Amino acid sequence: MPSLIGFYSLAFGSSLSFLIIFFSIKNFRNSKIFDKRIIFFSLLQLLLVFISFFGLIISFINSDFSNETVFNHSHTTKPLFYKISGTWGNHEGSLLLWLFVLTLFIFLFIIKSQRQPTQYRILTILFQQVIIVGFFVFLLKSSSPFSYIFPVPKEGLGLNPILQDPALAIHPPILYLGYVGSSIIFSSALSATCLNYISKEWASHIKQWVLISWIFLTLGILLGSIWAYYELGWGGFWFWDPVENVSLMPWLALTTLVHCILALEKRFILTSWVVVLSISTFTLSMCGTFLVRSGILNSVHTFANDPERGLFILIFLFSLIFLALFVFFFFHKENRKIDSSIFLVSKETSIIINNWFMMYFLSVILIGTVYPIFLEVISSEKISVGPPFYNNLIAPFLIPFMLAMTLGPKLKWIKSDIKDKIYLFTFFLISLLLSILIIKNLEINFLLNTLLVGFAFYLFFITLRDFFVMKYKNLSQIIAHFGFSLFILSILFNNIFTTEIITNLKVGETYTSEKFNIKFENLNQKQGQNFKSIVGRFTIVNSKGKVETLEPELRIYNQPNITTSEADIRTNLLSDRFITMNTVQNKDYFNIRYQIKPFMIWIWLSILLIATSGFLSLLKKKYEN
């Protein structure tokens, strides 16, 4: 019954799109007063999509296996929390969540934009409804979450065990808030372009949507990274997996857009950049949707492998891109009446330099992600692009990028100088000497790592000084740049000082090295709600005699019958001690992987600081110089 209600709610919700479009076009011609029927039908559409989504949740909770989506992704023994999160832990349910957030955001936009010109509001609604209609058609025609199975199975196939995790349960909704938030930016930018409304007032209005999208996308990526760190047993925070990349690309575009919106709000410059980035951000979000659901990516994160579904998204994506390009080239006009001159030494120049670097990083990631796909299509040759490709192309350019981040905020709008800023040179020398002292005795690339650490310290010290000297002026910017410097330093020290031991041990055996003794004490078993667990007990003694006990697990799930490795991680402010174990086929040995990962917690905290800067900027009523 919930599935039936959910289906008809979805169908009725789709029909409302045409009513909204009809009344919007009618209101656009006579735009003196905003038609309240548009608000009513938008609210009704939101409620119908919510009922549809809630109906799917109830079907998962009740283990209604007459619903094909529930049958494929749930099981009676699955804990309630994962039954609920399983609603969006699949292709069909995740798209329904996408649609729900789309309708939620356009309704909130209508409510929050009452002071904006009526024609601009209506045109934004029209562009957004084009996107909403596309998702309705996709769901109803090829990806319905309410397909019926007869005869009704007695049991379901279950949810992939690696998805049964609290961090991953909340990761998709938060990530989608970031993705779908970019749709409002897209629709708004196209509307403002058509009406020649790209202005300081528009920048102030759309800035909140840019920041909301950026904040949620940042937090969503953070949660996904934390999940991959402890659940997949890799022991790292980022592996340049293709699906990780498709979430990072719109984040880079959004970050660039944040800076451009602030510049546009202040000086009415970079209008073309703003429009292009608004289009690019949503396009990249949709590209991620296509790549994850088309089956052409080889990743642990992918949802579906149905080429027909991927083809629909691809056609829909190209249609939106064509629409956006048409609007940009035929309607976008540069306002020549306003003095938009940019001097070499100015804050505007630093923002443009920031844009160049961010677009370079985005291009590297885009090429590394899609090149293997095109190569396979053209030559049937399969390759994978791994961390060395990204590290070699990105790491050297982080040096001038961090220098621009350090000096840019010190400059003034229009024209500036760097006189009376001796402290900049002093902190640079201190940072460089400190990095040389740290790197000198390590057997690694001396020049590159010295410069990376040095400039990261430089940004760290300057932003730390600003926090105390500037008396909370531009606080959000200071926190963002400080968080980024802390992020880079934590990554560098994590990579430089990580210790790893990989060995095979039987119960009772001890691995001995100069730094550690690892003794495999025993094995125990315990029973979970839908899995059996084999728990290994290991005693680790370091060179200083400190003893620590760690207990990694092997979980054997009943449905589907999959074994997962669960890491045991002990965290303090300086490092993580990380251990996993896996079976060695046809032997009594277990493969043991023990790592000491310095400054891991600071990587997570630095990203939280960056997201916090977005919240602070969102709370500010006016951008300050």
Image (spheres, rainbow, N blue to C red):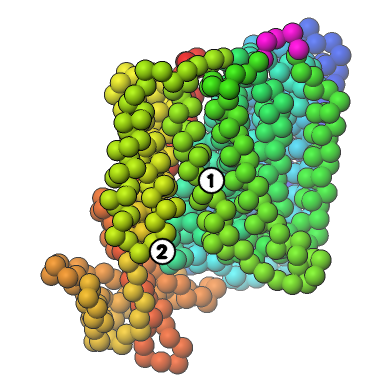
Farthest-out residue, left: 545
Assign a secondary structure to mark 1. helix
Q: Amino acid at mark 1?
A: Phe
Q: Is residue 118 visible?
A: no
Residue 163 is tagged as: none
The residue segment tinted magenta is 336-340
Q: Residue at x 79, y 33 (%)?
A: 324
Label 1, on which residue?
Answer: 397
Left or right: where 219 falls relative to 518: right
The crowding category of the residue bearing disc 2, from other C-alpha atoms within 10 Å (few below 14, some 14 to 19, many at least 20), is many
Q: How many marks?
A: 2
Mark 2 or 1: in front is 1
Decide which of tag 2 and tag 1 comes sooner along the chain: 2
Q: Is residue 150 visible?
A: yes
| Amino acid on which disc 2 is placed | Gly
Query: Is 105 rendered above or below residue 265?
Result: below
Tell me the element at label 2: loop
User: What kind of secondary structure does the magenta stretch mostly adopt?
Assistant: loop
Whether residue 77 appears in magenta in the rendering, the answer is: no
Q: Calculate the distance from the C-alpha at mark 2 to the C-alpha at mark 1.
A: 26 Å
**Residue 106 vs residue 567, the one in the foreground:** 567
Residue tagged 2 = 235
Question: What residue sits 67% from the left and 69% below the top?
Answer: 383
The residue sitting at 50% across, 16% down in the picture is 416
